[in-house]
Image: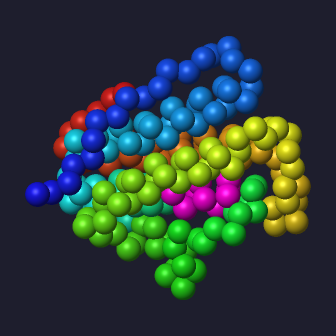
Amino acid sequence: MTWTAPAVERPDGSLTAPESELLRGYLDFYRTTLLFKCAGLTAEQLAERPSPPSNLSLLGLIRHLTKVERIWFRIHFATEPADPVFPPELGKDADFELIDPARAEAEYEGLIAEWKLSDEAAAGRSLDERFTFKGTESTLRMIYIHLIGEYARHCGHADLLREQLDGTTGA
């Protein structure tokens, strides 16, 4: 039996919450929006690249955002000794190139697990807490803003991919 991505409910967030809650809420909204775009598709559909010559697939976006979450929250901000999601010898585009529908469920669950680890890395920390990235000081606030933009951009890609796969549009 082929695995199918489950239905997802996107969270409602406050529009007037304090900044830290507002940023976390927007990130959670975009995180779940990506999975919302995948809901009801089979592993094979998630792995399909419907817009050649682009290497984009929904499964590739799931893999890419797992990598991005780990890099920013755990490796750069929390300086955890976390291994890269994809070993460097696989190349910088391994998240998009090395797609295997047989791994779709594990990759999907891996993204959700990485969200929890990212949230734990940021829990109780000030948005003004600083870290150094490539010799430049940055803050946890920047990570939230960067990831909201990253997810928003890739949710737009997911909209187009989904429409090409089965005609589903909107929301």
Eyeballing the image, is 38 above or below 62? above
Residue 32 at x, y percent in the picture: 44, 37
Q: Is residue 121 visible?
A: yes
Q: Give the range drawn in magenta.
A: 65-74
In the rendered image, the residue lying farthest to the left is 1
Q: Which of 114 and 169 is in front in this view?
A: 114
Quarter of the image where one finds residue 74:
bottom right
Q: Is residue 165 above or below residue 32?
A: below
Q: Which residue is drawn at 75% across and 38% down?
A: 124
Measuring 25% from the left and 67% from the top, which residue is drawn there?
A: 102
Q: Which residue is drawn at 49% across and 82% down?
A: 90
Q: Residue furthest bottom?
A: 89
Q: Nearer the viewer, residue 12 or 44?
A: 12
Q: Does residue 120 appear left or right of residue 19 in this picture?
A: left
> Could you tell whether 123 is left or right of 111 in the image?
right
In screen coordinates, is 82 left or right of 142?
Answer: left
Residue 71 magenta-highlighted:
yes
> Where does the image place residue 100, in percent across and percent down from the top left?
29, 70
Per the picture, the main secondary structure of the magenta-coloured stretch is helix
**Depicted 100 relative to depicted 110: above or below:** below
